[in-house]
Image (cartoon, rainbow, N blue to C red):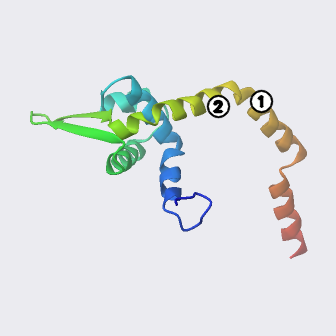
Amino acid sequence: MASVMDSQCPSRLVLDRIADKWTAIVIQLLAKKTMRYAELHREIGGISQKMLTQTLRSLERDGLVDRKVYPVVPPRVEYSLSRLGRTLIEPLRGLCRWSEKHLAELQANRARAKAKGDLNETYITRSSARS
């Protein structure tokens, strides 16, 4: 049986793909409608062309996104969610809503940790001083 708790389980690769921020954003956009590359790129703030290309290729390889190429000049390519990809809409939508709902609290926690001095940063600094 597959278990993400098992370090050798391939389901970790799936979790890695699905938990990626760009994957979540692309799936949320494609949940609304079929889109062309340039349209996706315009809608997603802060993503490089290279990262969008890699994300779309990975999603297509995993069967989550369908890529349709039209035989016209210049070539027209559209991306849409596959049947399997559509099963991710609700779980990822919930994750996105949770992120938006708790953003202020998370930012406040980070600011408090930074003001106190991040524990990892403090540990590294102290360990370096001993060496």
Q: Quadrant of residue 119?
A: bottom right
> What residue do we see at 68% from left, 25% from top?
101
Q: Are marks 1 and 2 in contact (CB under 8 Å)?
A: no
Mark 2 highlights which residue?
A: 99
Q: Residue 114: percent from the left, percent from the top?
A: 82, 43
Position of 129 relative to 32 (above/below):
below
Q: Residue 131: percent from the left, percent from the top?
A: 86, 76
* Residue at disc 2, secondary structure: helix
User: What amino acid is found at the position of numbered circle 1 in the picture?
Assistant: Glu
Say the numbered circle drawn on residue 120.
none
> What residue do we see at 74% from left, 27% from top?
104
> What residue do we see at 37% from left, 40% from top?
84
Position of 17 relative to 104 (above/below):
below
Residue extending furthest toward the front: 1
Q: Quadrant of residue 5?
A: bottom right
User: What amino acid is found at the position of numbered circle 2 in the picture?
Assistant: Ser
Circle 2: is it few (<14), some (14-19), or many (20+) Cα within 10 Å? few
Mark 1 highlights which residue?
A: 105
Please state which of residues 6 and 13 is positioned toward the viewer in this rendering.
Answer: 6
Q: Residue 126: percent from the left, percent from the top?
A: 89, 65
Q: Residue 43: percent from the left, percent from the top?
A: 42, 27
Q: Is residue 13 left or right of residue 5?
A: left
Q: Is residue 69 left or right of residue 34?
A: left
Residue extending furthest toward the bottom: 131
Q: Is residue 30 left or right of residue 101?
A: left
Number of on-image labels: 2
Circle 1: is it few (<14), some (14-19), or many (20+) Cα within 10 Å? few
Q: Is residue 17 left or right of residue 57?
A: right
Position of 85 relative to 13 (above/below):
above
Q: CA distance from mark 1 to mark 2?
A: 10 Å
* Residue at disc 1, secondary structure: helix
